[in-house]
Image (spheres, grey):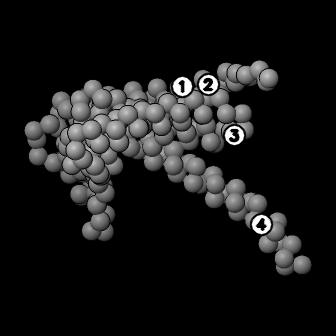
Amino acid sequence: MEQLQINWKRIGWVLGIVFFSIALDQYTKVLARTHLQGTLPKDYLDGFFRLTYVENTGAFLSLGSDLPGILSVLLLKILPVGLLVGLLLYTLFHKEMNQWQYIAFSFISGGGISNIYDRLLYGEVTDFMMLSAFGLRTGIFNVADMSIMLGLFLMLGKGLFQAKDKAAPQADADNT
């Protein structure tokens, strides 16, 4: 049986990113509850950036906000907790994970943990930012959502570059 090798550098990076993501998100949510709750939306940069307070009882873009009691608990609380615990353990201890992957998964875990913390503690997630350009608007989001998206973009970007790097020699060989 193999002995578990602990990579302390990875654990430091993962926990540091997770705690930073949670702390920054929770701090900005306190600011939003203090300064935005009960106020009209505030536009900045000619309407590109808007601060508006919303209490989201659902998931991404309020999906699932109208689910019945037990289904809501299962899909919006229990399942995400299980997935986040699994993702965090995988990120901390999977041997064949590179630095890009564990950094990306750390941002995703930190954002997810912060949002599920709100959902468990308050029954809802505080969202307060929106972007608008060329007649298009994003949904209302928070810093935890930004952390999750950053992790996804890191994974996607690195995956695309790796796929391109692996495909390039093959393409050169086909042209000879």
Question: In the rendered structure, which amino acid carries the disc numbered 4?
Answer: Ala
Give me the C-alpha separation between circle 2 and circle 3.
Answer: 13 Å
Crowdedness near tag 1: few (<14), some (14–19) or many (≥20) residues, C-alpha within 10 Å: some
**Quadrant of the image occupied by residue 76:** top left
Q: Are the residues flagged by discs 1 and 3 in contact, CB closer than 8 Å?
A: no
Which of disc 3 and disc 1 is earlier in sequence?
A: 1
Q: Which mark is residue 11?
A: 2
Q: Secondary structure at mark 2?
A: helix
Q: Secondary structure at mark 1?
A: helix
Q: Which mark is residue 98?
A: 3
Give me the C-alpha separation between circle 1 and circle 3.
Answer: 16 Å
Residue at 61% x, 24% y is: 11
Which of disc 4 and disc 3 is earlier in sequence?
A: 3
Q: Is residue 31 above or below residue 45?
A: above
Residue picked out by circle 1: 15
| Nearer-the-camera pick, 159 or 38 | 159
Q: Are the residues flagged by discs 2 and 1 in contact, CB closer than 8 Å?
A: yes
Q: Is residue 44 left or right of residue 16?
A: left
Which of disc 2 and disc 4 is earlier in sequence?
A: 2
Residue 4 x, y percent position in the rendering = 73, 22
| Nearer-the-camera pick, 152 or 76 | 76
Question: In the rendered structure, which amino acid carries the disc numbered 2?
Answer: Ile
Give me the C-alpha separation between circle 2 and circle 1.
Answer: 6 Å
